[in-house]
Amino acid sequence: MSWRLDPLALALSLGVLVAYVAGATSGDAWLCRVAALYGIAISVYAGMYLITGLAGVVSLCVSAVVGVGAYAAAVGLVRAGLSTPASLLLGAFAGAAISWVIAASTRSLADHYLSLATLAASEILGNLFRGWESVTGGANGFAGIPKPSLVGFALQRPVEYAPLCLAMGLGAVLFVGYVRKTAFGVALIAYREEGRRIEAVGLDSARLRRGAFFLAGGCTGLAGALAASVDGFVGPESFGVPQSIALVCFFVLGAQRGIGGIFLSAAISTILTEVLRQTGVWQNIGVGTIALALLAARTRTVTRIALAKAGD
Amino acid sequence: MHCVPLLRLASLRVAYSGRCVLDIGNVVLDSGGAGAGFLLGANGAGKTTLLNAISGYATSNGCTFLDTDGCVVRIDRLRPHAVLRAGVARTFQHPIATSMLTVWESVALASSIYAGTLWSPLSSSIRPAITPIFEALELSEVRDVPLLNLPLKWVRRVELARVLTSEPGVLLLDEPTAGADDVERAALTAFLGNTLPALVAELRARNAYRFPACNVWVITHDIQFAQAVCAAGDVRSPALVLDAGKVLREGSLEQVLRDPTVIDAWIGGMDGDVLDF
């Protein structure tokens, strides 16, 4: 199987780069920040590509895993004095570890029961974020997180940290792209389509799922760690079930385009969220309404082709 | 001393919601390494349940042993993937025919799973021993076709190829001729009667098959197919007839098909005279 450059993915990526360059040259921080958030979103959807796109598991704790990565990086940066690269690694590992635990504790579940279990996991983690005040700051959140810095250079402004976020996002896509080409990636597709029957050819399906959750959690944890550093603040209200549901909805929008769909999903979710942020209280209503309309428009196509095409 | 891996069942019992659906005493499944043994019985007799119990897809009481020339491995507490690794493979009555994976990808995946090379690119996962299996099942002509675009007969062949890549000592086939036309039945007859034993012998000679022979057992309602496999392999195939979850009769195919209790319980309800030895 060869790499194919999805035209839409290419167009979106170029559009983001153009927006970044325009923002950098004109001094428009908002455009640069959108580019940074787009890079972070790519990492999230790269992780979802493994779990939902290839393995066919609808996980409703994606946002919570992002939160685990964010809080882990925050603690590492503020309390342990870690460098930005170390905090990113810590966030990725924390996301991977918690995802592995979720997969291990749900090994006997499948289909919608598994999705419900991830919903429960999201609630548990949300309560942990709010309740573990000594570590997370509780409902008030964790503030004072330093901006990213690399090799002694502080990346204070969006024009400075956006390339880091885009590079991390691209790295996540390259990583899941490589996984897709391995027998492990093909096994995930087989698991999606055959379920437990895949064990008849010698594959330990529970172990496969743990592996997929681990890798996906690494990508989403990395996104959380980046987001914590970029925003300088982490709060529990950002990592709840509504956010996970929104992520799943946006992922489905890009699901048919395989890996290229990661860019589509990231672009739609980032642009919608940031553009509608100006509307204040109407942001969530607007995002939900537009997402619903886009999903409805694609429903016929989605049901015909199904998520099976997500693995291109 | 025997060369064919034997499947020894001891007090195998399966119950669903407290209701016993399978109660097998002490049975030894030994097809002799040529042709196949046959699991016969009416619908609901427990044939597929027996397969599920052996292969780990159904929880059972009792013991199941794989006996390879005195080396005995207990497999009744193992999960399906571990049962396959121990050497017992099975196919399904209704294979998944909606997969977007191509024929080659499906077989290569099975090969890489067995070889333990999941983290390598799929293209490097093909072992040389796979090629004879591919050719024996004539899969080269549909190599790059997704399974969802193939007729059922090809999907069954792919499923067979996938399990053969794990070099099983025992092969359990669940209704392999269901929905098959005469051409496909003849092809499967030839495969079980001649091609598979020769393939196993060839791979064994190349140190590419871990068992000395393959003990094949087939669930079927197709008595003509069973008789044809016997004729093709020129062997007296063993048969085990189940009825209501219990063993009704065991012996050679010829013997069981002439047994009055078998005729009363099963064959008597079938249309047409098919017994012709």
Image (spheres, rainbow, N blue to C red):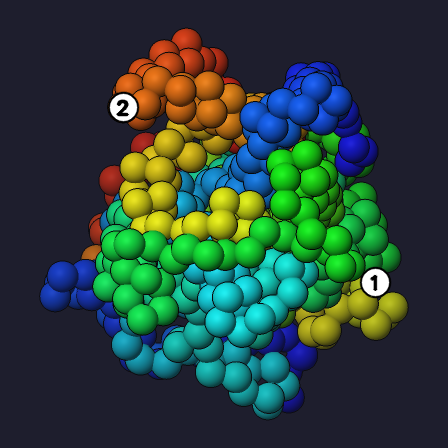
Q: What label sits on residue B39 in the rendered view?
A: none
Q: Nearer the viewer, mark 2 or mark 1?
A: 2
Within 10 Å of disc 2 (Cα), the crowding (few <14, some 14-19, many 20+) is few
Q: Is residue B110 left or right of residue B38?
A: right
Give the residue drawn at x 31%, y 80%. Answer: B62
Q: Is residue B192 left or right of residue B218?
A: right
Q: What chain does badge 1 belong to?
A: B
Amino acid at circle 2? Val
Give the residue drawn at x 61%, y 82%. Answer: B68
Mark 1 element type: helix
- Report which residue position mark 2 lands on: A281
| Above or below: residue A138 compared with residue A66 | below
User: Looking at the image, can residue A41 be seen?
Assistant: yes
Residue A134 at x, y percent in the picture: 31, 71
Q: Nearer the viewer, residue B275 or B128?
A: B128
The part of the image, by quadrant, that contains residue B237 is bottom right
Q: What chain does badge 2 belong to?
A: A
Residue B25 at x, y percent in the picture: 30, 77
Residue A49 at x, y percent in the picture: 55, 40
The part of the image, by quadrant, that contains residue A101 is bottom left
- Report which residue position mark 1 lands on: B202
Q: Nearer the viewer, residue B156 or A22?
A: A22
Which quadrant would the N terminus of chain B be assigned to in this image?
Answer: bottom right
Q: Nearer the viewer, residue A50 or B235?
A: A50
Amino acid at circle 1? Glu
Farthest top residue in view:
A297
Give me the C-alpha separation between circle 2 and circle 1. Answer: 73 Å
Give the residue drawn at x 39%, y 57%. Answer: A142
Q: Nearer the viewer, residue B166 or A111?
A: A111
Residue A126 at x, y percent in the picture: 29, 54
User: Looking at the image, can residue B40 be seen?
Assistant: no
Q: Looking at the image, how many numbered discs can be counted on the residues?
A: 2
